[in-house]
Image (tube, grey):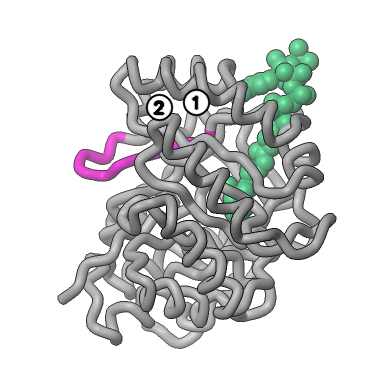
Amino acid sequence: MAEVRLLEVGPRDGLQNEPEVIPTGVKIEYVRRLAAAGLKRIEVTSFVSPRWVPQLADASEVLAGLDLPGVELSVLVPNQKGLERALEAGVKRIALFAAASETFSRKNLNRSIAESLDDYRPVARQALAAGMSLRGYLSTCFVCPFEGPVAPDRVAALTAELLEMGVDEVGISDTIGVAVPPQIRATLKAVLEVAPVEKLALHLHDTWGTALANVWAGLELGIASFDASSGGLGGCPYAPGAAGNLATEDLVNLLERSGYDTGVDLGKLAEASRFLAQALGRELPSRVLRVVD
Ligand code: HMG
Ligand code: MG
């Protein structure tokens, strides 16, 4: 069976977008249940400004409550201060996040794309020197909610810049979940001119219901790393129109039944999502969650 890598982003991308702040204990239990379902890479929280994202202000407490041998826990870091907090928390993997469109970069990071990359370079050097591993994200790779379509060449050039900093994987992101397979193919083909396929992941939101079709377009180009959030939680508070991420249940079902090994137990994953849905007091949008026992 072909192997694929999954990154579970529900605790970070999902919970950052909830209008209410979820109790720290619930977050910890949610992550534990995700790990028990077989997810080996989990993005737990963000060391961003608590004024910008109050939902994740308890990042240090969440991490302090987790002891999950064999599971790679990662966090988002936007700047030097975020790195310091991550070092203090003993985190081994951080994700630096940039954007492919100027307006989104300013809305999300209060900086231009070039400023954000300049700020990230010393952060990346210090993190690598401290023995951390690095992931990169590139938002708005297909469409920006403010500027419209984004040119594939631009995405390729910025992916190359992130790789030069030493990130081992770049999450090519459809931030507002509107891309369709021809856009995925056009952009990935441009990116593959500058980046090896094993350093690329797809981070897809599912606003318009095209995420699974886009996963398939990625698989056909050799992509073997996908982000998803349990139950289909998620969004970005600074991207109007961004609904949930591709649901992990929907992704696991598609992959497993198509001959890929994810290592995830769908029933246990659904239990984790239902635990969170109960805490949130609402249903989650995953299709497969509705039908799996
Ligand atoms: P700024 O206001 O320009 O920053 O924000 P600043 O340096 O002027 O600092 C402002 C205040 O925040 C100061 O506090 C700092 O100390 C504090 P004050 O002195 O006023 O009390 N501060 C921090 N506190 C804790 N941790 C930190 C930190 N940094 C500053 N790391 C900043 C700039 C980058 C901080 C801000 O814009 C920010 O936090 N942005 C993050 C926004 C965010 O988290 N967005 C969602 C994640 S990205 C996403 O969802 C997309 C993704 O899923 C891919 C996709 O789908 O596209 C990854
Ligand atoms: Mg996202």
> Is 16 located above or below residue 49 in the figure?
below
Residue that protrudes farthest toward the right in the picture: 146
Residue 71, magenta (yes or no): yes
Q: Is residue 250 visible?
A: no
x 81%, y 45%: residue: 103
Cβ of mark 1 under 8 A from ligand 1: no
Query: Residue beneath label 1, please?
Result: 60
For badge 1, the amino acid type reads Ser
Counting the numbered discs, the total is 2
- Using a 10 Å C-alpha cutoff, classify the residue at mark 1 as few (fewer than 14 neighbours), some (14 to 19) or many (20 or more): some
x 51%, y 46%: residue: 159
Q: Is residue 138 visible?
A: yes
Secondary element type, mark 2: helix
Q: Which residues are magenta?
A: 67-76
Determine the CA span between mark 1 and mark 2.
Answer: 6 Å
x 58%, y 16%: residue: 81
For badge 2, the amino acid type reads Ala
Taking 50 as reference, is 201 left or right? Answer: left
What label does residue 64 carry, if any?
A: 2
Q: Position of residue 87 (x, y in %)?
A: 42, 18
Taking 103 as reference, is 22 left or right? Answer: left
> Is 118 located above or below residue 34 in the figure?
above
Q: Quadrant of residue 94?
A: top left
Q: Position of residue 1 (x, y in %)?
A: 15, 76
